[in-house]
Amino acid sequence: MAKRIVILGGGTGGTLMANRLRKLFDRDEAEITVVDKDDRHVYQPGLLFVPFGLASVDEIVRPRARQLHNGISFHETGIDHVELEADVVHLENGTTLPYDVLIVATGTHLQPEETEGMTGPGWMEKVFTFYTPEGAAGLAEALYDFDRGKLVINFIDLPIKCPVAPLEFAFLVDSYFHECHVRDNVEITFVTPLDGAFTKPVASELLGHLLTEKGVELVTEFNTGEVDGAGGRLVSYDEREVPFDLLVTIPLHGGADYVNRSPGLGDALGFVPTDPATLQSKARPNVFALGDATNVPTSKAGSVTHFEGELLTENVRRFLAGESLDASYDGHANCFIETGFDKALLIDFNYETEPLPGRYPTSLGPMQLLHESRLNHLGKLMFQWMYWHVLLPGREIPGISPRMTMAGKKAVETNA
Amino acid sequence: MATIEMTGIARDPEGFLTDPAQWNENVAETIANEAGITELSPRHWLIVNYMRDTYLSTGQAPSIRALGKESGVQIKELYVLFPKGPAKLAAKIGGIPKPHGCI
């Protein structure tokens, strides 16, 4: 009898897992079902470009169902809860889906209402987030009219998706105001709860220098307690204030709502406690998770999900065959960091190794790590095509290993 | 006010204990004093013990958000109890390593 594999979420992780598993198993070996509440698959890295008119929302959204190969069934409905004891998912439309293997790939969700005042007066007028298509499009309008004053970029707390995106926004908005010849009239401030520009020492130092070079003021260890949209103030829990005319904020993130309605599945923030090496959940042996939905200590980023997908496909096969799991996922992540003026950096790291300078994927390049170049920027732009045509269908990207390698990387001494 | 001999207790450059097993309540009081907290109230102890228990059972110290959701003390009060960085300071007083922001 065919095994029943149910995948919750039809985003990056859910789609690539469904397609990889469909290729691995014949139809009489496994039935594969994907559930998502809507049919809009957003290419999320594209959101960063929308505020600057460099991409439109239409260009970065495609139907979810169309990204799934033949032989995968798609349910467009919300998830009510998972009943772990019974191996059943209850959907909002009343359908129940029994499973042999469950894969949680429902990502992370914004919680702007968790911060006092954020969605109050000024929300979507002078307080925006570019982490949603609506917010990014609204911000594009607001930036178009913004020619003087204080622009503040801030994130409330980790974890957030793509932790470098707020910095990229700072670099791009500096570039944007230069091109519009209004940079001298605009003060840009980057407000972070961290003690530096970024979490990892070598990259943090370099990115901090870039902010200084670009004239962006850095305010650190600022834990936002309140957004006062009407008064144009960010207020921290220790009662410091940063004034703004336009605020670009990244709200708190949590897991999907149904996780909290499913006893035993998630942690306090709605993320699924997951073994960082095998991607098996701590909840049940037949429940796995990947991408932003897990609590594993690496970036919430598409590259992570992609690297996890290859290992998780193998582990689903092993689990169903009764073999022991492959425990070799190392937290590998990489990302392009847009730095403005058509240049970008590239960083590559894992659980153990922080981002280091050098070349990628090997010492011959062609990409440069932790160094601004036009080629890295072109790499980022080209990636959108790769996403839809290589990554989601579950094909391999030539020369890119799911596990990090030290080839091309140079060790750096730090004081941290 | 408790003051004890802190020699022999290994701490990192920022003052976090490197071995949670060397911790005791006197050590906690002494580190709290260093940070300007003259006396640890029952509310302080609630948080310090919560941090320590969570770390010892899961290997990870809770973030300030998880603390605000699960400890029974709201984030605003946490900042009154442990000024500036509640999660960091409570971890230091609780004798566990500095919490790392999840990237």
Image: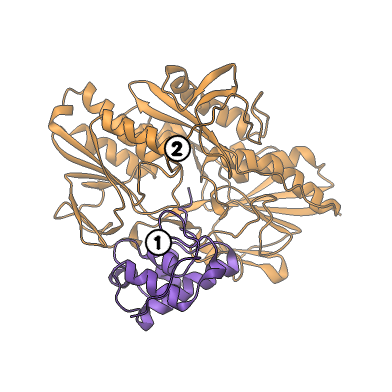
Picture residue at 18% right of the left edge, 34% below the top? A145
Question: Residue at label 2?
Answer: A414
Q: Position of residue B22 (x, y in %)?
A: 54, 69
Give left or right: position of B43 versus A69: left
Q: Position of residue A210 (x, y in %)?
A: 32, 30
Q: Between residue A320 and residue A63, name the one nearer to us.
A: A320
Mark 2: which amino acid? Thr
Q: Which chain did the image draw in orange?
A: A
Q: Is residue A73 above or below residue A184?
A: below
Q: Between residue B77 and residue A407, name the one nearer to us.
A: A407
Query: Distance from label 2 to label 1 (Cα)?
Result: 22 Å
Q: Chain of mark 1?
A: B
Picture residue at 24% right of the left edge, 62% below the top? A238
Q: Residues within 10 Å of mark 1 (few under 14, many from 20)?
A: many
Picture residue at 58% right of the left edge, 62% below the top? B59
Q: Chain of mark 2?
A: A
> Quick one: which residue is furthest to the bottom in this view?
B42
Question: Residue at label 1?
Answer: B88
Residue A329, image quadrant? top right
Q: What tint does the image give chain B?
A: purple
Q: Secondary structure at mark 1?
A: helix
